Amino acid sequence: MKALLALITARNIEFSRDKSAIGWSLFFPLIIVIALALVFDDENPALYQLGVYGDVSELTEVTSIKHIEIIKYDDFDEAEYKVARHHIDGLINAEAYWINASSPRGYILEQLINAKAPLLKRKEVTGEAVRHVEWILPGIIGMNMMFSALYGVGYVIVRYRRTGVLKRFQVTPLSAWQFLASQLVSRLIAIVGTAVVVFLVISVLFDVEVRGSAWLLLLNMTLGSAAMISIGLMVASRTRSDEFCNGVLNLLSWPMMFLSGVWFSLEGSKSWVRNIADALPLTHLNDANRAVIIDGAGVTDIANHLIFLFLVTLAGLAIASYRFKWN
């Protein structure tokens, strides 16, 4: 019993001396709860989403209906596509409204529009709804790649540093960037290989068709994985504390898990939420994967996502190499 109590006391003293671990244990849950409350708490949740194109100031009787979320579009083709794929429930401008006849929610929204603005012309948009498995599959794969990259690389390097493995590497001709590059390539092969296997199995089981290029999908997954790994390398480039590394990785991964379109679409979300989401690499990975799988997008269509992921990879590796400590 004395030995047990001594070990418990020693571990408590060790934890109390690690100020970073105490800080993350106290403040990280508070940060997450406050952030989620600000982003997702809504006293008046919308039941329907109505796109608006152009000036509809004279249709306040429609746009002011409670529990209908108004989403403004500057590109008519984009708005019409959203209706066709059931991303939004309807679209209006000053003269007409567009409804997808196969959408149950669109049918209800049409009744409300006709009741408030019966003179608007009806125009029909055709298109099938995206199957749930097709929409969620890229997000789940992207989330799995994120966790494998961040934690798989971060913990390994911190353990190497804490156990003295890196100190042994320091006396060899190996440079910091070579060590980091080896970690990136090694983890990249494992993550992409695993993601491909998971995707193939799900595709066969649920008959998921890739409408775009499979090679382009593979390129995007590779760049997305590299971006995540480079962030993990950057976090682990100096720290020796497992607790601190875990806290930082949680702070990075949780916002991406909730704001990068893994579980639900951010269509019509607040502008500041969308701005944060657009700065996250997982958002670009998921958006590009969905564009290739669902819409058959080409290189030019997802070029902005590919460039963003490539730049994140370069920046992460550069910062990690500059800050890297062997001990």
Image (tube, helix red, strand yellow):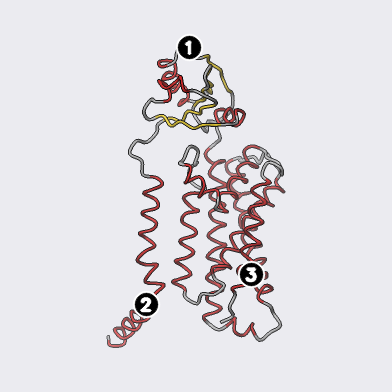
Q: Which of marks 3 and 1 is nearer the N terminus?
A: 1
Disc 1, SS: loop
Q: In this view of the protein, which residue sits in the foreground, 225 or 113?
A: 113
Q: Is residue 313 above or below residue 271?
A: below
Amino acid beneath label 3: Gln
Amino acid beneath label 1: Leu
Q: Which residue is drawn at 46% across and 50% down?
A: 258
- Please give the residue where the numbered disc 1 appears in the rendered image: 119
Q: In which quarter of the image is residue 20?
A: bottom left
Amino acid beneath label 2: Phe
Name the residue furthest top: 119
State the CA–CA distance, disc 2 to disc 3.
29 Å
Q: Residue at x 35, y 78 (%)?
A: 16
- Please give the residue where the numbered disc 2 appears in the rendered image: 15
State the CA–CA distance, disc 3 to disc 1.
64 Å
Q: Quadrant of residue 238?
A: bottom right
**In what quadrant of the picture does the C terminus appear?**
bottom right
- Please give the residue where the numbered disc 3 appears in the rendered image: 183
